[in-house]
Each structure stands twice: as C-alpha cells, then as structure tokens.
C-alpha cells in the first residue's frame, strides 16, 4: 500500500481568521506540505490541475519538478492531468522530462476535470469530452511506447514520423491511473490498457464507487490482465483529527461550513456518514479506513485531502504529523493483514523496470545523428527497440 496526500490547489479564505492567502503564499505552502509529507513517512504527493481562480495549479509539472528537487523518496503524481484539453504531445514531453528529473518518482492521474469552462478556454467542445479522452490517451500511449509515430485522428493535426522527446526514463513510461468519479467509460478505458483506476470517492456514497470499481475489476479480467483482485485501485479520502474527537469536530466545523465544496449542503454529520470524510480521533480514522477494503476490495493507494477549505499551514502540518505518527503505520499493518498473495503491490518505477527487463540493463535512449527534423532515416535512436505497437482504445488509430 502507498499512502499520501493530494491537493486540489484551492486558495480559500480562512473562516476563522478571515484571511485569504496570496497566490505566492499558497504555492510556497504546498511545497512545504509536500516536503513535510516525506518527512512524516508518507509515500505520495499528488497535485491537481486547474486554470482558473481560486486555484493556483495551472502548471503541475513546474511545481512537482520543484518538489522533486527538494525530496528524495516521495512519489510525485498529478491528482488530475486534463487529458481532454492538453495536447497529448505536450503531456508526453513534459511528463517524460519530469520523470527523468525525479528519478522515476512520478506517475499521473488522467482525468477530464470538473470545470466545464476549461474546454472553450483551450479550444475544445465539452460535448466531445469522452471522445477527446479516448483519442488523446490513445495517442499519448503511442508517443511513449513508440519511437516514431504516424497518427491521424479527429481532434489534432496529423503526425508523420514524429518522435516525442525525451524518451521515458529506462524505456518505461510513467504509470497512469485513470481518475473518475462518475463515468463508467473511464473505468473501461483503464481496464483496457491495464492501467490503474483512481476513484476519488470524497463526495458520493460508497455504493456509487463500488459500481465503478466493480466494473473496472470485471473488465480488467475481460481484457486478460488477470483476476479482478489483481487490478490496481486507488482511493481518495478526507480526514481531520485531534486527540479528542470533540476537539476535532469543533476545530473543523467552521472550515466545513464555509468551504465552497461543502457550504450550504449537508451537515458535517450527514456528510461524514455518507462519504469517507472522517472528523475525530486518529483511532476513528484508522477504524474507518481499515474498513475500506471491505467495501472496495484490496487496493494499492490511499490519498487524503487535507490542505483545503482555507486551513492554515500550521494546522495542515499538524494533520500530516498525526497521519504519519499514529494513523498510517497502523493502516499499513491492518491492510497488509490477510492480504491475498495475488494482490499486487502498488506500482513503482523500479518494479516496472524489473518487470520489463529482468536482470538486463534498461534502455538509455541515445539519438543518432540526424538533421533534427524527426524524419531522417528510420529510428532516430542508436539502440534497437522492438516495436511494441500502440493500441488505441475504441478509435480507428489502432489500424
């Protein structure tokens, strides 16, 4: 199991102090949060992508690269990479570069996001959201898996003899999770490619996500990747803790009541009953999250949303300490207990390199001399890489 944090990068007024942090302050704080997550023994830090106020994370690659330079062990991820409105060529280039700089400590969650206006901002039509997700990801896979790509699709200009640079580290592309809170087609897509499925189950009742995860596991087996229990699943979560449960309730209530995503909706008590939000003692958090596999099966990654709703940095760091000292060590033991041998570990770059090469040396991409036009001769690289062929889920591009 991997445990970590994800941030949606909101900049929200603190309802207790009345202060709204500036953009630079919030950006500096999220770097401090990521560093502290590593110090506390957590495994993952994930950052969302947004292109509008009140969010700051319009360039997660930049922020994650900065964090990579200040950490040694932490796996860096996106909480959402917008596969619909970003050019797949730019995603391939940017994240291969970040993967190299981070020494393989990188993966991505692909998603469509939840901000409708982002589509026209980037020249896209929200009514084409699903076809865009399908076609763009098919191209991205080929750009990472093949040195030279010929491509023609609906949503971007054609590619002829194109090579995305740099090539993925060790010839192994970043691991991809497909994130969805409502769309069965995305669960199908994740299963088709043998990728992970991240269910950010922080807003709706468990039964909704049980259906999505169940579909993903069934289709994983259908596509020949293994039994349903071998599928790679990640979950979201939300917690706020104090040594005494009532203290946690009292301290978190103003943030819950004022947060844009909660305010004017269900009461905090109703919301905690319906969703994974747990406000109470560390033991209550342990009990709640140790039971998640009873709902969703054994899974590989658990991420918590903590730095939101205007909470000040000091409070967030205190929550990370409680996670690292009292909650995560116990959850590691509990979720390891009676775990079937068939259930795989969470994916890491090192493990995926071993799977690809065994005891052999991994790839080191070395360009041949050429005119710099991406089309001179055959492969633009000195080493000989077998063609793996990129499959395109549900599109004509696979032919």
Image (cartoon, rainbow, N blue to C red):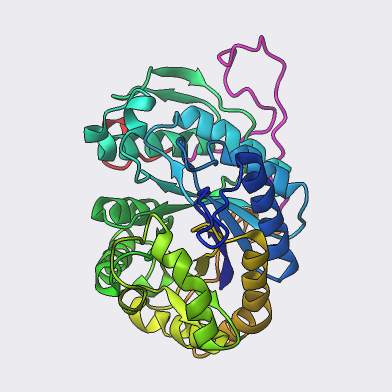
Outermost residue toward the top in this view: 371
Residue 390 at what x, y percent from top left?
42, 38
Q: Main secondary structure of the magenta part?
A: loop
Instruction: Say whether residue 88 is left or right of residue 208.
Output: right
Residue at 42 percent across and 40 percent down: it is 82
Locate the N terminus by quadrant. Answer: bottom right
Residue at 25 percent across and 68 percent down: it is 208
Q: Is residue 374 above or below residue 20?
A: above
Instruction: Say whether residue 127 is left or right of residue 246.
Output: left
Q: Visible in this render: residue 311? A: yes
Residue 68 at what x, y percent from top left?
72, 48
Residue 193 at what x, y percent from top left?
39, 51
The foreground one among 173 and 89 is 89
Outermost residue toward the left in this view: 127
Q: Visible in this render: residue 395? A: no
Residue 93 at what x, y percent from top left?
58, 31
In the rendered structure, does residue 371 fall within the stretch colored magenta?
A: yes
Q: Which residues are magenta?
A: 360-388
Q: Is residue 19 above or below residue 88?
A: below
The foreground one among 192 and 245 is 245
Locate the C terminus by quadrant. Answer: top left
Q: Is residue 265 above or below residue 273?
A: above
The foreground one among 378 and 370 is 370
- To which quarter of the image does residue 364 belong? top right
Q: Is residue 153 above or below residue 80?
A: above
Instruction: Say whether residue 148 is left or right of residue 62.
Output: left
- To which quarter of the image does residue 72 belong? bottom right
In the rendered structure, does residue 92 fall within the stretch colored magenta?
A: no
């Amino acid at each position: 199991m991997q445990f970590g944090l994800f941030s949606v990068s909101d900049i929200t007024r603190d309802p207790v102090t009345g202060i709204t942090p500036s953009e630079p302050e919030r950006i500096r704080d999220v770097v401090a949060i990521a560093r502290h997550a590593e110090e506390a023994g957590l495994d993952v830090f994930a950052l969302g992508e947004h292109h509008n106020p009140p969010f700051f994370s319009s360039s997660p690659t930049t922020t994650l690269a900065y964090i990579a330079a200040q950490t040694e062990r932490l796996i860096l991820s996106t909480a959402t990479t917008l596969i619909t409105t970003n050019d797949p060529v730019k995603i391939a280039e940017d994240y291969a570069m970040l993967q190299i700089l981070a020494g393989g400590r990188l993966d991505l969650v692909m998603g469509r996001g939840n901000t409708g206006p982002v589509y026209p901002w980037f020249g896209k039509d929200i009514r084409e959201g699903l076809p865009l997700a399908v076609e763009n990801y098919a191209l991205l896979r080929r750009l990472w898996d093949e040195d030279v790509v010929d491509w023609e699709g609906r949503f971007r200009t054609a590619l002829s003899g194109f090579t995305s640079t740099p090539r993925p580290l060790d010839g192994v592309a970043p691991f991809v999770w497909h994130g969805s809170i409502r769309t069965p087609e995305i669960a199908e897509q994740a299963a088709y490619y043998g990728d992970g499925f991240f269910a950010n189950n922080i807003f709706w009742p468990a039964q909704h996500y049980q259906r999505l995860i169940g579909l993903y596991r069934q289709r994983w087996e259908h596509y020949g990747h293994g039994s349903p229990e071998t599928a790679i699943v990640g979950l979201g979560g939300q917690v706020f803790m104090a040594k005494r449960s009532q203290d946690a309730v009292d301290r978190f209530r103003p943030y819950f009541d004022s947060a844009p995503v909660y305010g004017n909706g269900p009461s905090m008590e109703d919301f905690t009953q319906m969703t994974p939000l747990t406000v109470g003692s560390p033991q209550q958090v342990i009990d709640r999250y140790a039971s998640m596999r009873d709902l969703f099966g054994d899974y590989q990654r658990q991420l918590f949303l903590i730095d939101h709703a205007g909470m000040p940095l000091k409070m967030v760091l205190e929550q990370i300490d409680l996670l690292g000292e009292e909650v995560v060590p116990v959850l590691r033991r509990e979720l390891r207990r009676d775990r079937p041998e068939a259930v795989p570990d969470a994916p890491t770059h090192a493990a995926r390199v071993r799977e690809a090469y065994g005891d052999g040396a991994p790839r080191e991409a070395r360009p041949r001399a050429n005119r710099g036009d991406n089309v001179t001769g055959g492969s633009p690289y000195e080493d000989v890489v077998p063609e793996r062929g990129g499959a395109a889920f549900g599109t004509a591009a696979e032919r």
